[in-house]
Image: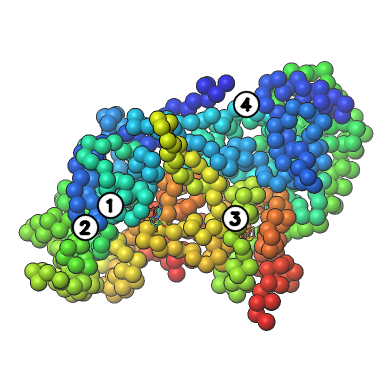
Amino acid sequence: MNGEHKCLAETNPFTPHPARIVRSYHLTKDVKFFQVRFVDMEEALRFDYKPGQFAMLSILGAGEAPFCISSTPSRPGLLEFCIRKMGTVTSALFELKENSFIGLRGPYGNGFPVEEMRDKDILIIEGGMGVAPLRSVLLYSLDNRDQFGRVAVLYGSKRPSEMIFSEEYFALKGRNDLECHLAVDADDTGKWTENIGVVTTLFRHLKKVDPENTFALVCGPPVMYKFVIKELIKLNIPKDQILMTLERRMKCGVGKCGHCAIDYIYTCLDGPVFNYWDVLHMRELI
Amino acid sequence: MRILKLQKKDLFPLLKVISREAELWAPTAKGDKFAYGRVLDFSRIAMDAVRTIIPPKKIMVPSLFNMFNFTEKGYQEDLSHVTDRILFGIHPCDIHGLLILDKLFSQAYLDPYYLEPRKKTLILGLSCLPDAYCFCKSTHTDIIEEGYDLFFTDLESYFLVWIGSSRGDDLIRLAPDFFDDKLTEKDIQTYTKWQEKRDNAFKTTVNFTRMPDLMELNYKAPFWEEVGAACLACGSCSMVCPTCNCYNVVDKLFLGNKPGKRLRHWDSCTLPEYSEVAGGENFREHKSQRLKLWYTHKLQAYVSKYGKPSCVGCGRCLVTCPVQIHVKSVADALEGHPVEAFWKKFAQEVSK
Ligand SMILES: Cc1cc2nc3c(=O)[nH]c(=O)nc-3n(C[C@H](O)[C@H](O)[C@H](O)COP(=O)(O)OP(=O)(O)OC[C@H]3O[C@@H](n4cnc5c(N)ncnc54)[C@H](O)[C@@H]3O)c2cc1C
Ligand code: SF4
Ligand code: SF4
Ligand code: FES
């Protein structure tokens, strides 16, 4: 009798769709960049995402894990990921050669409210792996430059060798339609020409901010948030215009497995992007 | 809604007719407890089972099953746990439990692994009388108005049978001769008496309307530390709760050319590895934090979303937790009442 209960693959939200690694290379020692393309063109067209959304990647035999989409929907065709080697899934992914198959499903989560952010100034503050979700919104705003006001980026890394997408960011410094300030906590090369210090030290280089008209987007290691938010509050940016992405363990991405719950919020459905006002009301985070 | 009368002697013959359509599952005795299982011999059905060890969620989503077979060619969904079933003997609280799971597994995305078996399962409810641990009256889940195909109320020598769906009606049509649609004044009196008797039989109560506020106000109350210190992090409370839906997924490879399997198994937020994220960071390292999440979900979260708690008053956590951390003892602590539970004694012992 079981045969007739087959539910179509399209309707099973857990089905990983075959995709191919088009290109992959190291960004730093333990962070790799992946360009991925769906095997089925229809699937590629159906996959309509917003900056800040994430996808579940399946590596045959190793398992499945959530990753932010680092590319921008304004450059369709390829999906890009920026991934740090952590454990089982990510290690297996690092071993895969170009042209290998992986499974992909999504896009999931709320993403950044790009419609609401229209005509507003964008201030991006990022550290370490925080570039993974924020690169998407940065590239999106640059591709749609006329839809946004000022764009400014403050980006901190531990050391020059740990700076992710360093070429891309140095290239941004040459543009005159955005501000880009870079820092490392410490320079062990002697060749670093930018700022030295934690990311918050970059605030003093920032041109005057129009707080009511600014969306601040923050992503980085947990320690970073407290200090960055203090600076943003000092600048009088409204709490609901300070956006951040939260990371929780996720096993399904679609609100079923319960793993990503904070209080009554499912990070995978209601997040991963939250504003600071929301976060203040999540008891577990205070 | 139609209500019919069925003589007790006709129950097994009726089950015989309708179980030709699908597997019959019902509670059967397991030692001095009860468990849902497939029944071929109807005399094994435990008509007096108050609660089964594991709720009927296990019939929809087994504690462990395969989601996908995978090879280099891709992922092939496996829905082999789906079969046509008739679930007989399920009480109102557990039907409410399924209604809550229905919401969870169909909000935003449809989960076929739960919803397909659910669609294929006919629900034949059965009335019950509470024991000392039942408190479904407090959760307003003591009666059921939707979510069943047939519901049998046991009135000693006969049943009143409620028809709750057109599929239920189809079952009746398979054996119309067993049923009598003429209810007398006396039948109604008998039923009203039975209802009164049942209403008065509840011994445990919990004031749920107060719980959301009390959870908020007591978020930092010291008793959570005591609860956390005593909890064994065994996860039993989640396994037995009819509204706990959390699960984990693991991929398994096999030797030779066999396809790999993506397995899904029940999980519990009371287990230590539940909330770990990249870099070994754990947002809920302490057991007290994890239990707060559990109780936030049971007593507060669902209330703010759907206007009622996600506890259906089945009493399973009351009879299961080895250190007596359960909805009743936590509610007592939240209300500032004296708590007799083991975890309180444990806390007193330790602080000596
Ligand atoms: C919405 C979201 C977006 C993310 N985006 C990115 C990204 O763009 N790039 C990136 O490198 N990483 C990202 N992560 C983190 C990434 O999902 C984890 O690093 C990955 O799951 C680790 O899997 P693993 O099998 O390699 O490690 P495991 O072998 O599972 O474990 C290694 C470590 O990671 C922890 N861990 C296990 N499972 C998870 C999980 N599902 N989520 C988080 N931690 C886990 C373990 O506790 C352990 O400390 C994101 C996570 C979320 C929730
Ligand atoms: S919390 Fe306890 S009493 Fe309530 S439904 Fe779950 S197991 Fe039953
Ligand atoms: S609360 Fe009780 S049943 Fe639940 S994990 Fe702790 S000891 Fe086990
Ligand atoms: S990841 Fe499963 S519920 Fe959010």
Does the residue tagged 3 have its C-beta within 8 Å of any atom of ligand 3?
Answer: yes
Among numbered discs 2 and 1, the one appearing first in the sequence: 2
What distance separates the C-alpha of mark 3 from that of mark 2?
A: 39 Å
Identified by mark 4, the residue type is Asp
Under circle 1, the secondary element is: strand
Q: Earlier in the sequence, mark 4 or mark 3?
A: 4
Q: Tags 1 and 4 in contact by the CB under 8 Å rule?
A: no
Q: Residue furthest right?
A: B186
The amino acid at mark 3 is Gly
Q: Is residue B200 visible?
A: yes
Q: Secondary structure at mark 4?
A: loop
Q: Nearer the viewer, mark 1 or mark 4?
A: 1
Tally the marks.
4
Question: Which tag is nearer the camera, tag 2 or tag 1?
Answer: 2
Q: In which quarter of the view is residue B5 placed?
A: top right
In percent of the image, x 42 and y 35: which residue is there?
Answer: B255
Marks 1 and 3 close (CB-CB < 8 Å): no
Which residue is disc 4 drawn over?
B84
The residue at which mark 2 appears reads as A29
Element under disc 2: loop
Q: Nearer the viewer, residue B304 or B52?
A: B52
Q: Which of the chains bears the disc numbered 2?
A: A
Residue at horizontal 52%, vertical 21%?
A4
Q: Is residue A96 above or below residue B216?
A: above
Q: Quadrant of the rendered structure where residue A275 is? A: bottom left
Which residue is labeled 3 in the image? B235
> Does the closest atom of ligand 1 sit within 8 Å of the Cβ of label 1?
yes
The nearer-to-camera label among 4 and 3 is 3
Q: CA distance from mark 2 to mark 1?
A: 11 Å
Picture coordinates of residue B30, whole percent (x, y) = 76, 42
The residue pinned by badge 1 equals A83
**In which quadrant will I find the C terminus of chain A?**
bottom left
